[in-house]
Image (tube, helix red, strand yellow):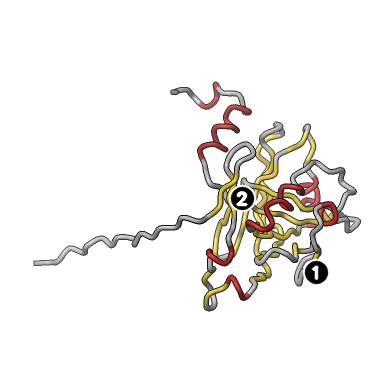
Amino acid sequence: MECPAQTLAPKSIHKLLLGSIVPRPIGWISTVDERGVPNLAPYSYFNAVSADPPCLMFSAQLRRGSPKDTLANVQATGEFVVNIVTEKLAEAMNATSAEFPADVDEFQAAGLTAAASVAVRPPRVAESPIHFECRVYQIVPLTDGELGGHLVIGRIVHIHIHDDVLIGDDKIDLAALRPIGRLSGPSYVRINDIFDMTRPTVPTSKTP
């Protein structure tokens, strides 16, 4: 297959991206609207951006030309929480991917516990072992198309990590965390086959 990207329909590009860029981490984003109603939804257009300043990003597509609840909430309040999804939470995470009406609390719908955050208003998923509380750093509109949406960059203002997934002060025990990743369609992946490679060093030239 060889073709200029502009000749493909956005839906085809969407499928190619989701099938090629795998596995993708899942950002389980909790927000509240201006009335304080919680919202919780998973995003696999998600990743780390920077450690200084500490920032995360996710991309929220439009739904029938209008912002999804998550995007509308971060635009209105400027705050969100990223909750890390583990194997035990896979079914609950999937339940929150349904397109509920804006007045539905996905925490209750998925049988999850909403825990108060420290620095922001949106609650955390108590069952998740890692949470990143964020304030919006920048929102970048991409297009108004159905598969365009907005890139949301959040600055991390508070971090919660359960001691049982932490090694020392700053290393995550992946065997204890057991995160899952997103593939395409209905498919997900477990992290159960890890291998290590040491980054090579470039020999320095010696002056004769």
Q: Is residue 138 above or below residue 159?
A: above
Q: Residues within 10 Å of mark 2 (few under 14, many from 20)?
A: many
Q: Residue at x 72, y 34 (%)?
A: 144
- Residue 30: percent from left, percent from top: 76, 56
- Residue 190: percent from left, percent from top: 56, 52
Q: Residue at x 91, y 56 (%)?
A: 35
- Residue 170: percent from left, percent from top: 53, 73
**Distance from label 1 to label 2 (Cα)?**
23 Å
Q: Is residue 130 left or right of residue 191?
A: right
Q: Is residue 136 left or right of residue 203?
A: right
Work out whether mark 1 precedes mark 2 in sequence or the reverse, and give the earlier one.
2
The residue most toward the left is: 208
Q: Amino acid at mark 1?
A: Ala
Res. 36 image quadrant: bottom right
Name the foreground residue: 88 vs 155: 88
Name the foreground residue: 178 vs 197: 178
The C terminus: image quadrant: bottom left
Using the image, tell me which numbered label, if any, was put on residue 116: 1
**Residue position for label 2:** 46
Q: Is residue 162 above or below residue 197?
A: below
Q: Is residue 111 left or right of residue 86?
A: right
* Residues at discs 1 and 2 in contact (Cβ within 8 Å): no
